[in-house]
Image: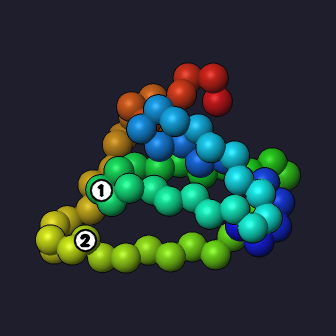
Amino acid sequence: MLQGRLVVDCDGVRVEAGPGDVVRVPPDRPAYYSAAPYARMFYVYGTNPEGLASTTFADRAAAAPADG
């Protein structure tokens, strides 16, 4: 994280990150990001080492806590 606060939801776990923090999202897992009022981050995305197609959840509740 560079500036602001970022909330990341993945696999039912919610993490709040601030400047200097690093958040790692496991491969092949959907994650949802939110910021109020803003966040500036450096995002690194790598290819799937097995060459598999990307997948996402259509239902946010499958990956994020209900309190968000």
Q: Which residue is the site of mark 1? A: 28
Percent across and percent down for residue 27 are 33, 59
Q: Judge left or right: residue 63 versus residue 67.
A: left
Q: Which residue is the site of mark 2? A: 48
The residue under label 2 is which amino acid type? Asn
Report which quarter residue 2 is drawn in: bottom right
21 vs 9, nearest the viewer: 21
Seen in the picture, residue 8 relative to 45 is either above or below; the reply is: above
Q: Name the quadrant of the N terminus.
A: bottom right
Tag shown at residue 59? none
Q: Residue at x 36, y 40 (%)?
A: 58
Q: Is residue 40 visible?
A: no
Q: Residue furthest top?
A: 66
Report which quarter residue 23 is drawn in: bottom right
Within 10 Å of disc 2 (Cα), the crowding (few <14, some 14-19, many 20+) is few
Percent across and percent down for residue 64 are 50, 34
Report which quarter residue 18 is drawn in: bottom right
Q: Judge left or right: residue 59 versus residue 44.
A: left
61 vs 15, nearest the viewer: 15
Q: Residue at x 29, y 56 (%)?
A: 28
Within 10 Å of disc 1 (Cα), the crowding (few <14, some 14-19, many 20+) is few
| Separation (CA) of disc 1 from disc 2 | 8 Å
Seen in the picture, residue 37 relative to 60 is either above or below; the reply is: below
Asked if disc 1 and disc 2 are in contact, CB closer than 8 Å, the reply is yes
Q: Residue at x 58, y 38 (%)?
A: 14
Seen in the picture, residue 33 relative to 54 is either above or below; the reply is: above
The residue under label 1 is which amino acid type? Asp
51 vs 24, nearest the viewer: 24
Closer to the chain start, of discs 1 and 2, is: 1
Q: Residue at x 37, y 76 (%)?
A: 46
- Helix, strand or loop at label 1? It is loop
Percent across and percent down for residue 35 are 74, 51
